[in-house]
Amino acid sequence: MPPGHAEAALLAERVLAYDPRADVGLITRAGQLAAEAHATQKRDNGDPYITHPLAVAGILADYRLDSATIATALLHDVAEDTSTGLKEIERRFGPEVARLVDGVTKLTRIELQSERTKQAENLRKLVLAMSEDIRVLLVKLADRLHNMRTLHFVPQLARRQKTARETLEIFTPLAERIGMDALKTELETLAFQALHPEARQTIAARLTFLRGQGADLIKEIEQDLRRVLAVHGATAVDVTGREKSPYSIWLKMQKKNVAFEALSDVMAFRVIVEDRAACYVALGAVHDAYRVVPGRFKDYISTPKTNGYQSLHTGVTVPERRNAKIEVQIRTREMHEVAEYGVAAHWIYKQGPGAPGGTARKRYPWVRALLDILENAEGAQEFLDDTKLELHRELVFCFSPKGDLIELPRGATPVDFAYEVHSQVGDNCVGAKVNGKIVPLRHQLENGDQVEIITARGGQPNPAWERFVVTGKARARIRRFVHARQREEHQENGRSAIIKAFRQEGLEGSEKLLEGALKALKQPGLPELYLAVGSGSLSARDVVQAAVPELRAPPRIADTLPLARPRGRLGAGPLLGGRVERPGGSRGAGPPAGMPVRMPVTGLVSGMPYHFAGCCHPLPGERILGIVTTGKGVTIHAADCHSLENFSAAPERFLDIDWAEEAVSGQVGRIIVETRNRPSAMASLAETVAQQDGVLAGLKVNHRDPESCEIALDVEVRDLRHLERIMGALRAPADNLRVERARG
């Protein structure tokens, strides 16, 4: 019998032992196909490849999963790594197994993309698949667990560390979200060993030393807890103690910035009782016998976690044992089963024949949040970052005015709360009340807060919210709005720039005329054309010359000669319905007499003083306006500068100006960069600017914390397009979290 066939038969019998309705034939046939398809393949350690899908299926059998899930585990690499495709799997095993296999299959053949983009695409597909059937995630977690168990056989250090890092960033929080604590802990332990072997060895050695000093300290405290519970009439079904894992100890050391010796609660004890009422009796007994550590009590029975976890947690000091601080968890057997096995504890075979697997988006709010991020994210990298933000979070629990419980990450604000209630509530949010009092929208919520969101019809997200929201869902939605608004602004700016370019040629353009030039300009439609011009990737002059090719002739005679260029209407209908006439002689006046350097702008009276606004730093290539100020001359702003709103009541102060055809280079644009706080951050930013032929004229740190810092860069550039190229280069490194132009 070929390798794997006998093991598949034994696996089928094992599943049948806990699920009498199991489809033994399905599991056996899946094992046989997997063995045949992977017959020529080897693992990194030299073992036949079939050992991997068999091990994955065995892990899921430990969690007592149904036949379709076990078959999927056996076949999960067949469609990806062999010549047998999904259609063949569907023909032989049915649509359910084929759908699950497709959901688990990784997107590894994405060409010409970065590793982070591949990771984002894999996660995107996983989120979509598990939103329909959570079993996809279960198979994926089991697959990752076996890969982590055999990670030491992978020869390349970089590959081992990449897999371990991805495990900690994505798979362990996913396991935690569906309540599979035992699997999550093992993944963390294996990843910690791969990423920080010296730290793990040091902590393990320290635990061994303490264990020797303590002389069975855990067993002594277990016996003392049983005695305390018996005295108070709280009979315990079981009491067990354990040391916390090296990884959880290391995390606490990092978070508190303390040495191992400063940690006191490295031991945890679990008390299992008969029923829910007994949990509170046991809690009273523990609190009566030992001194409570303030701030360590949590009631997850009356307020369960979103993954279904229920338990009482408390921290106490055991004085008879050298004032040891310990954590005590109190729960029933059923609660313990859910805590250890999570979603697998409620699986399909327990729900009766024909019961559907169900969609995760209905049962798990966090899956809906990931789907919202997927819908609103502008790109793969943004989706990956926001998803990690959503998965890695400590929690606070708040209430709506109707008493609905809303789970949020620590540090969440009323804006996060609003988006957690509904995306539309977040978009229309204009204010908030916390515990009946009006608070700023950046106010940080605390456990037990009652939050009321004040909305207004037609309200819109404020781009400034992105600076303080902490949920991935809120950030993705705000970014989507900002990007949409920027797109609209670019389109409007582009349309206006094209109108002006036609006007400068003495022509009246039309949509029909522009449509004829789309092919030459490689633009799919007019909106995309306006966007390209407005964003600086295409000049308005290029558009005019593409629409009217005869304008590409040799340089024209000066404007003063009559009929130097065509006048009048070209094409059918004015551009977007707006009539455009040739400008008067006050425009394009040229440099004032006697000035040694040509003025960068046109439309100013000779000798009039001017300066560029520091709030928006206008650049050649974008629309500009002048504001006349008595005694100070003209301040030149970008046309979309928010500061112009301050002069809306005095339209007579506005001056219509434009850049000269050969505006002098060396204008300064300001870029805001939020980057990870690292020693080389500023040097890296300066190097990137220099590589793009920019000149760093100034640098200022606006904000700094242990995780990130916000830096303002003043950069001398030729024009708007040059600035946008520099911003694009700054966005490329993963350490740069946000890059945007500073505007008034």
Image (spheres, grey):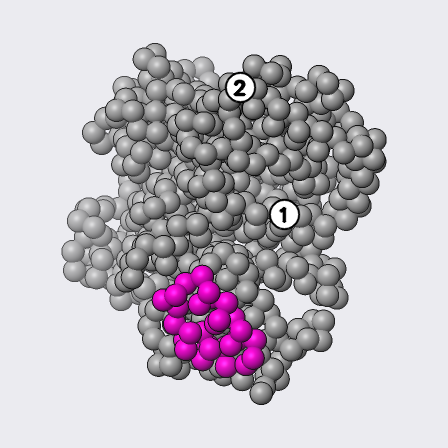
What is the span of residues highlighted in magenta in the rendered image? 5-32
Residue 19 painted magenta: yes
Task: Give the percent coordinates (x, y) of residue 1.
Answer: 58, 87
In the picture as drawn, the residue positioned furthest to the bottom comes out as: 1
Residue 390 painted magenta: no
Q: Quadrant of the C terminus?
A: top left
- Report which residue position mark 2 lands on: 232
Task: Tell me the residue at 59%/58% (across/down).
Answer: 145
State how far apart marks 1 and 2 are (Cα).
38 Å
Q: Amino acid at mark 2?
A: His
Task: Give the percent coordinates (x, y) of residue 325.
Answer: 68, 23
Q: Is residue 645 above or below residue 118?
A: above
Task: Tell me the residue at 44%/41% (across/down).
Answer: 334
Q: Is residue 154 above or below residue 497?
A: below
Closest to the observer, 675 or 320: 320
Closest to the observer, 295 or 639: 295
Rendering quarter of residue 327: top right
Circles 1 and 2 in contact, beta carbons < 8 Å: no
Q: Is residue 575 above or below residue 464?
A: below
* Residue 74 seen from this side: yes
Rendering quarter of residue 238: top right
Closest to the observer, 575 or 237: 237
Q: Amino acid at mark 1?
A: Glu
Q: In the rendered structure, find residue 188 and report the number of the disc placed on it.
A: 1
Task: Tell me the residue at 55%/65% (across/down).
Answer: 58
